[in-house]
Amino acid sequence: MIDVIEKTATTLLEQTPGIVIRYRLLRDVRRKMSNCPELQQAKDNLKYSQCIQELEQEQREDGGWGAFHSRSTRMKRKIPSTEVGVERALSLGLDASHPILQKVSAYTLGIMQGDILFPDYHEKNDRWQTGMRLFLASTLSLIYPDHPALKDDRELWHEIRGRNVSYLNTPRTVPDVRFSRIRFLGCTRFRARAAV
């Protein structure tokens, strides 16, 4: 199977694919070493990608793309939130060394450290602060999985997971109503079901 994938990648590379596709094939499929001249040239050519130029143009001075988590439908922007901007940058082959991701990392850390205000509307519930930290930490971890600023957040989520597993393993005599997600045509719907 690996041979088929590599042969397909070679065939695609011979057909002069787009800038991003060429780079991703060389880096991710052909697994060229970072010091390979062909890979270095492909990485350097990313600056000519229209999609990457769009990311740069829409990125704000502070490093974000407007709202952090909430996607704005009113604003006519191609990048509706900072989370989407980071996901798009990574899917286009950018890594932590690229200025776009360096800028958004500094912005995210600034919010996490309290130096920059979280740009989204603050929901009025007791889970908001925890959810906001989750949005920030999970986005930063996409760029820097081992960043030291993520240590406390990881510990919190390990604790939450442990409590949930413990709760689920506790026998109950009274039926307990839970909500389960059902994916239907791209929407998440909830339905109650009795726990056994």
Image (cartoon, rainbow, N blue to C red):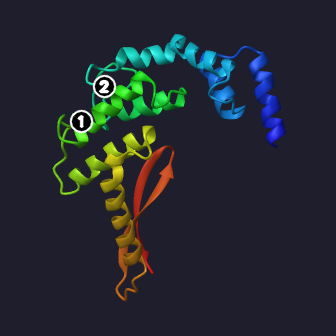
Snapshot quadrant of residue 125 = bottom left
Q: Name the side, left or right, on which 177 lies relative to 111.
A: right
In the picture, the disc for residue 110 is 1
Q: Is disc 1 placed on a helix, strand or loop?
A: helix
Residue 188 in picture, x, y percent from top left? 43, 50
Q: Dot 2: within a 10 Å radius of its alpha carbon, few (fewer than 14), some, or many (20 or more) residues?
A: many
- In the rendered image, residue 6, in percent from the top left (x then y), is placed at 79, 33
Question: Disc 1 to disc 2, how far (Cα)?
Answer: 10 Å
Q: Is residue 163 left or right of residue 113?
A: right
Q: At 30% from the left edge and 55% from the top edge, which residue is drawn?
A: 152
Q: Is the C-beta separation of discs 1 and 2 under 8 Å? A: yes
Residue 89 is at least partly visible in this image: yes
Secondary element at tag 2: loop
Q: Judge left or right: residue 73 versus residue 47.
A: left
Mark drawn on residue 63? 2
Across and down, in percent, residue 86 comes to 42, 32
Residue at 42% over, 53% down:
189
